[in-house]
Amino acid sequence: MEGKEAIIAKIISDAEKIGAENIRAAEEYALYVKKMAESWENDYSSAQEKALKTETEDVVARKKIVAELDVRKTLLKTKQDILDEIFLRAEQKLCKLDKKSYLSLVLAKIEECADDGDEVVLSCDGVISEKDIADSQVAKSKKLSVAKKQGKFYGGVMLVGKICDKNLTFHEIVLAEKEKVAPLIAKKLFG
């Protein structure tokens, strides 16, 4: 029996050695897999952090661009509002001219634009009268008539002609000047 027990002891001893070797190999493999997983985790985490940082920078850059555009749009609107206010005040000042200056301006515009036989429509502000226009040299030389009914506008006159009508209201005069001088005024005001 001793031979049998020696064989069994040898088998058990060999099995224990193989088992210990398998456990050691399994532990080494587990360490290797753990290191690989940690390395992958670090690489993945770094890549995700870089991607997140890049995405964050892109979002911030886009937001800055949109904010800059909004600021420019608001600034442009404000500048346009200021220019509109300037020309509105110019129109209001023309409407408030004393009668002599008002009539002089209206007659100058009529002389510049009227065709023979046009009819002059006065504004409803009542600053100048039918007589003021009819007695003028330009009305006599161009054979202009004055409409009995006033127009529904303030400041200036309108000319009604056979070929075309001409708007000589202060609003239109200022609007025409605005198109010419607004860029110069804007440059002086806003640089």
Image: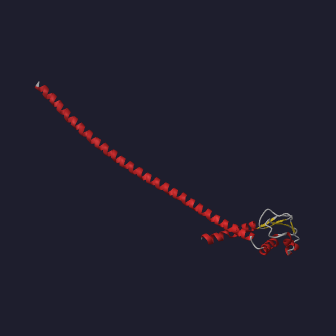
Query: What residue appears at the point 26 percent right and 40 percent down from the top-left corner?
Result: 27
Asked which quadrant contains residue 183, the reply is bottom right
**Residue reaching furthest to the top:** 1
Query: Which residue is at the front of the view, 127 or 138?
Result: 127
* Residue drawn where x is 49% and y is 56% of the image: 60
Colour treatment of the image: secondary structure
The image quarter in which residue 83 lies: bottom right
- Left or right? Give the position of 78 relative to 59: right
> What quarter of the picture does the N terminus occupy?
top left
Residue 91 percent coordinates (x, y): 72, 68
Which quadrant, please, contains the C terminus?
A: bottom right
The image quarter in which residue 106 lies: bottom right
Q: 69 and 37: which one is in front?
A: 69
Vertical arrangement, residue 179 with respect to residue 39, above or below: below
Q: Is residue 58 above or below residue 20?
A: below
The tally of labels here is 0
Residue 19 screen position, x and y as percent: 22, 35
Left or right placement of residue 69 versus residue 149 in this view: left
**As rendered, which of 96 and 1 lies closer to the eye?**
96
| Residue 139 position in % (x across, y down) | 86, 72
Residue 104 on image: x %, y %: 79, 74
